[in-house]
Image (cartoon, rainbow, N blue to C red):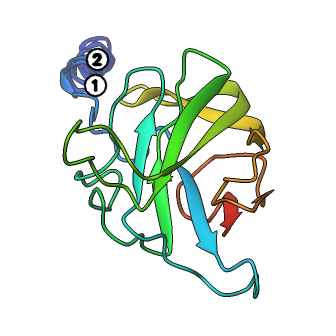
Amino acid sequence: MKKILPSLLIAFLLIHFASCEKDDICVDGDTPLIVVGFYDIEDTTVFKDVPSIRIRAVDNDQILSDSDAFRFSDRTNSPDSLSIPLQISTGSTQFEFISDSADDADTGEETGNIDQLTVNYAVREEFVSRACGFVAQFDNLSITLPESAENWIQDINVVQQTVENSNNIHVKIFH
Protein backbone atom coordinates (compact mmCIF):
# COMPACT_ATOMS: atom_id res chain seq x y z
CA MET A 1 0.00 0.00 0.00
CA LYS A 2 2.87 2.38 0.83
CA LYS A 3 4.26 1.92 -2.70
CA ILE A 4 0.92 2.31 -4.47
CA LEU A 5 -0.15 5.55 -2.77
CA PRO A 6 2.83 7.69 -4.00
CA SER A 7 2.47 6.21 -7.49
CA LEU A 8 -1.24 7.09 -7.58
CA LEU A 9 -0.54 10.60 -6.30
CA ILE A 10 2.07 11.20 -9.00
CA ALA A 11 -0.22 9.79 -11.70
CA PHE A 12 -3.09 12.03 -10.51
CA LEU A 13 -0.91 15.15 -10.58
CA LEU A 14 0.41 14.36 -14.07
CA ILE A 15 -3.10 13.80 -15.43
CA HIS A 16 -4.38 16.96 -13.73
CA PHE A 17 -1.67 19.26 -15.05
CA ALA A 18 -1.66 17.70 -18.52
CA SER A 19 -5.37 18.39 -18.90
CA CYS A 20 -5.11 22.11 -18.10
CA GLU A 21 -5.44 24.42 -21.08
CA LYS A 22 -3.27 27.46 -21.55
CA ASP A 23 -5.08 30.80 -21.70
CA ASP A 24 -4.67 31.96 -25.31
CA ILE A 25 -6.38 35.32 -24.94
CA CYS A 26 -4.19 38.22 -25.96
CA VAL A 27 -4.91 41.47 -24.11
CA ASP A 28 -1.69 43.47 -24.49
CA GLY A 29 -0.55 42.44 -27.95
CA ASP A 30 -1.14 45.38 -30.29
CA THR A 31 1.58 47.16 -32.20
CA PRO A 32 1.23 50.81 -31.16
CA LEU A 33 0.17 53.59 -33.49
CA ILE A 34 2.07 56.86 -33.67
CA VAL A 35 0.03 59.69 -32.15
CA VAL A 36 0.25 63.09 -33.87
CA GLY A 37 -1.07 66.26 -32.22
CA PHE A 38 -1.88 69.49 -34.07
CA TYR A 39 -0.92 72.80 -32.43
CA ASP A 40 -1.15 76.51 -33.12
CA ILE A 41 2.16 77.94 -34.38
CA GLU A 42 1.41 81.25 -32.61
CA ASP A 43 0.73 79.64 -29.20
CA THR A 44 2.48 76.26 -29.17
CA THR A 45 0.57 75.05 -26.08
CA VAL A 46 -2.86 75.30 -27.73
CA PHE A 47 -4.37 72.58 -29.95
CA LYS A 48 -5.51 73.76 -33.38
CA ASP A 49 -7.88 72.00 -35.78
CA VAL A 50 -6.80 71.20 -39.32
CA PRO A 51 -9.73 72.01 -41.65
CA SER A 52 -10.95 69.15 -43.83
CA ILE A 53 -7.95 66.92 -43.11
CA ARG A 54 -7.05 63.83 -45.07
CA ILE A 55 -4.09 61.56 -44.43
CA ARG A 56 -2.99 59.25 -47.20
CA ALA A 57 -0.28 56.57 -47.09
CA VAL A 58 2.03 57.17 -50.04
CA ASP A 59 3.11 53.55 -50.66
CA ASN A 60 -0.40 52.12 -51.16
CA ASP A 61 -2.52 55.27 -51.64
CA GLN A 62 -4.70 54.23 -48.67
CA ILE A 63 -6.72 56.99 -47.02
CA LEU A 64 -6.41 56.66 -43.26
CA SER A 65 -9.76 57.31 -41.60
CA ASP A 66 -13.20 55.97 -40.87
CA SER A 67 -12.14 53.15 -38.59
CA ASP A 68 -11.81 52.62 -34.87
CA ALA A 69 -8.02 52.43 -35.16
CA PHE A 70 -7.64 55.94 -36.59
CA ARG A 71 -10.53 57.58 -34.69
CA PHE A 72 -11.30 60.34 -37.19
CA SER A 73 -13.35 60.80 -40.32
CA ASP A 74 -11.95 61.74 -43.68
CA ARG A 75 -12.21 65.42 -44.61
CA THR A 76 -13.50 66.68 -41.29
CA ASN A 77 -11.83 69.08 -38.91
CA SER A 78 -9.12 67.19 -37.11
CA PRO A 79 -9.44 66.19 -33.49
CA ASP A 80 -6.65 67.29 -31.13
CA SER A 81 -4.62 64.26 -32.12
CA LEU A 82 -4.68 61.37 -34.60
CA SER A 83 -3.31 57.84 -34.36
CA ILE A 84 -1.72 56.43 -37.50
CA PRO A 85 0.12 53.15 -38.25
CA LEU A 86 3.74 52.74 -39.23
CA GLN A 87 4.99 50.01 -41.56
CA ILE A 88 6.71 47.19 -39.71
CA SER A 89 8.58 45.77 -42.70
CA THR A 90 10.58 48.93 -43.43
CA GLY A 91 12.35 51.65 -41.48
CA SER A 92 10.25 54.47 -42.89
CA THR A 93 6.69 55.35 -43.83
CA GLN A 94 5.53 58.25 -46.01
CA PHE A 95 2.25 60.07 -45.54
CA GLU A 96 0.53 62.93 -47.29
CA PHE A 97 -1.08 65.26 -44.76
CA ILE A 98 -3.70 67.21 -46.71
CA SER A 99 -5.29 70.39 -45.33
CA ASP A 100 -8.50 71.71 -46.94
CA SER A 101 -8.89 68.41 -48.77
CA ALA A 102 -11.45 68.32 -51.59
CA ASP A 103 -11.91 66.83 -55.04
CA ASP A 104 -11.79 69.04 -58.13
CA ALA A 105 -15.29 69.16 -59.62
CA ASP A 106 -14.02 68.55 -63.17
CA THR A 107 -11.06 66.18 -62.78
CA GLY A 108 -11.79 64.57 -59.39
CA GLU A 109 -8.18 65.16 -58.35
CA GLU A 110 -7.12 66.36 -54.90
CA THR A 111 -7.18 70.16 -54.52
CA GLY A 112 -6.05 70.53 -50.90
CA ASN A 113 -2.69 71.70 -49.60
CA ILE A 114 -0.51 68.55 -49.54
CA ASP A 115 2.55 68.16 -47.31
CA GLN A 116 4.45 64.87 -47.61
CA LEU A 117 6.06 63.68 -44.40
CA THR A 118 8.56 60.84 -44.10
CA VAL A 119 8.65 59.10 -40.74
CA ASN A 120 11.93 57.26 -40.09
CA TYR A 121 12.43 54.74 -37.27
CA ALA A 122 14.05 51.50 -36.18
CA VAL A 123 11.68 48.56 -35.65
CA ARG A 124 12.16 46.56 -32.46
CA GLU A 125 10.18 43.38 -31.90
CA GLU A 126 9.23 42.52 -28.33
CA PHE A 127 7.80 39.23 -27.14
CA VAL A 128 4.60 39.85 -25.16
CA SER A 129 3.28 36.36 -24.43
CA ARG A 130 2.58 33.04 -26.06
CA ALA A 131 -0.95 34.14 -26.88
CA CYS A 132 0.11 37.54 -28.26
CA GLY A 133 3.44 36.63 -29.78
CA PHE A 134 5.63 39.55 -30.83
CA VAL A 135 4.63 43.18 -31.25
CA ALA A 136 6.61 45.85 -33.02
CA GLN A 137 7.80 48.94 -31.24
CA PHE A 138 9.58 51.86 -32.84
CA ASP A 139 12.80 53.60 -31.75
CA ASN A 140 14.75 56.65 -32.95
CA LEU A 141 11.67 58.32 -34.43
CA SER A 142 12.36 61.26 -36.75
CA ILE A 143 10.24 63.11 -39.31
CA THR A 144 11.27 65.02 -42.39
CA LEU A 145 9.22 67.48 -44.39
CA PRO A 146 10.67 68.93 -47.61
CA GLU A 147 10.90 72.71 -47.30
CA SER A 148 8.48 74.69 -49.40
CA ALA A 149 6.86 78.10 -49.17
CA GLU A 150 3.52 76.36 -49.78
CA ASN A 151 3.71 74.03 -46.76
CA TRP A 152 0.79 74.39 -44.37
CA ILE A 153 2.85 72.56 -41.74
CA GLN A 154 5.24 75.15 -40.38
CA ASP A 155 7.14 73.09 -37.78
CA ILE A 156 7.38 69.53 -36.42
CA ASN A 157 8.58 68.48 -32.98
CA VAL A 158 9.19 64.82 -32.07
CA VAL A 159 8.21 64.67 -28.39
CA GLN A 160 8.90 60.95 -27.85
CA GLN A 161 11.45 59.15 -30.00
CA THR A 162 10.24 55.74 -28.82
CA VAL A 163 6.75 54.47 -29.68
CA GLU A 164 5.80 51.74 -27.19
CA ASN A 165 2.11 52.59 -26.74
CA SER A 166 -0.57 54.81 -28.23
CA ASN A 167 -1.42 56.65 -25.02
CA ASN A 168 0.59 59.87 -25.50
CA ILE A 169 1.40 62.29 -28.29
CA HIS A 170 4.66 61.35 -30.00
CA VAL A 171 4.79 64.13 -32.59
CA LYS A 172 3.56 67.73 -32.49
CA ILE A 173 2.71 69.42 -35.78
CA PHE A 174 2.49 73.21 -35.72
CA HIS A 175 0.46 75.10 -38.33
User: In terms of image quadrants, where is residue 160?
Assistant: bottom right
What residue is shown at x 64% (from left), y 40% (from top)? Answer: 117
Residue 170 to residue 41: above or below: above
Indicate the quadrant containing the N terminus: top left, top right, bottom left or bottom right.
Answer: top left
SS assignment at label 2:
helix
| Image location of residue 36, percent across then percent down | 58, 59
Classify residue 79 as left or right of residue 166. Answer: left
- The residue labelled by disc 1 is 17
Question: Amino acid type of disc 1?
Answer: Phe
The residues bearing labels 1 and 2 have C-alpha atoms spaced at a distance of 5 Å
Residue at the far front in the pictured view: 106
Closer-to-camera residue (75/133): 75
The residue lying toward the viewer, choosing from 1 and 29, is 29
Residue 125 seen anywhere in this rendered image of the structure: no
Q: Residues within 10 Å of mark 2 (few under 14, many from 20)?
A: few
Secondary structure of residue under mark 1: helix
Q: Quadrant of the C terminus?
A: bottom right
| Amino acid type at mark 2 | Leu
Left or right of residue 88, residue 124 in this image: right
Between label 1 and label 2, give the one nearer the viewer.
1
Q: Nearer the viewer, residue 87 or 125?
A: 87
> Which residue in the structure is indicated by mark 2?
14
Asked if the residues shown at circle 1 and circle 2 are in contact, with their CB atoms under 8 angstroms apart, the answer is: yes
Q: Position of residue 170 (x, y in %)?
A: 67, 57
Whole-percent x and y of residue 112? Answer: 43, 53
